[in-house]
Amino acid sequence: MSATIRLATKQDLPAILRLYAQPGLDDGEMLPLDEAARLFARIESYPDYHLYVAETGGEVVGTFALLILENLSHLGARSGLVEAVAVSPEQQGQGIGRLMMEHALERCRTAGCYKMALSSNLKREQAHAFYDSLGFERHGYSFRMDLP
């Protein structure tokens, strides 16, 4: 499968919101487009926080966010954090996710990151197998607290 990874634009938001509405992600719910546009503008204001899309045949088929963090620990080495990974159900298993993660890894290497990390819900076993296949190491624990 041939796909292009590029920075997302405001025009991509309807397609990105549809990707996030998948079962297991936002379960059919979507942000209103005006709210998504406001949040997208805020994301764009951060210096090293970007939303990317995977596009094939002019169609957005995947997305992810990458934040490059500055650190005082690790002797100042940066780290990369991947969030909000989604691939169209029709395109899963076609190499889109692999291409997106390779792009994220290359961006992290170029930025001088010592690691790239992501978290995945315990229920998403297919996603875990995918990340294992890419060479990610299951490391530590992810903790969260839902807030009202």
Image (spheres, rainbow, N blue to C red):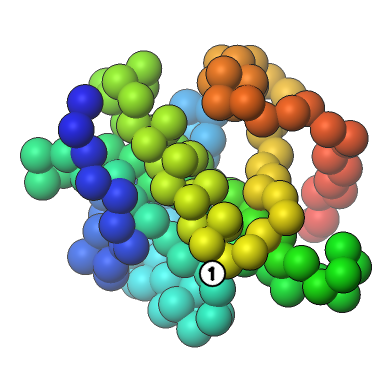
Whether residue 124 is visible: no
Q: Quadrant of residue 40?
A: bottom left
Query: Judging from the image, what secondary structure is the residue with disc 1 in?
Result: strand
Q: Is residue 121 left or right of residue 10?
A: right
Which quarter of the image is occupied by the C terminus?
bottom right
Residue 37: x and y, percent?
37, 72
Q: Is residue 139 left or right of residue 32?
A: right
Crowding at label 1, few (<14), some or many (≥20) Cα neighbours within 10 Å?
some
Say which residue appears at 17% left-offset and 39% top-offset: 56
Q: Residue at x 9, y 39 (%)?
A: 57
> In the image, residue 29 lies at what x, y percent?
45, 43
Question: Mark 1 is on which residue type?
Answer: Tyr
Q: Residue at x 86, y 48 (%)?
A: 145
Where is residue 122? Give x, y as percent.
73, 24
User: Toward the viewer: 50 or 148?
Assistant: 50
Residue under label 1:
49
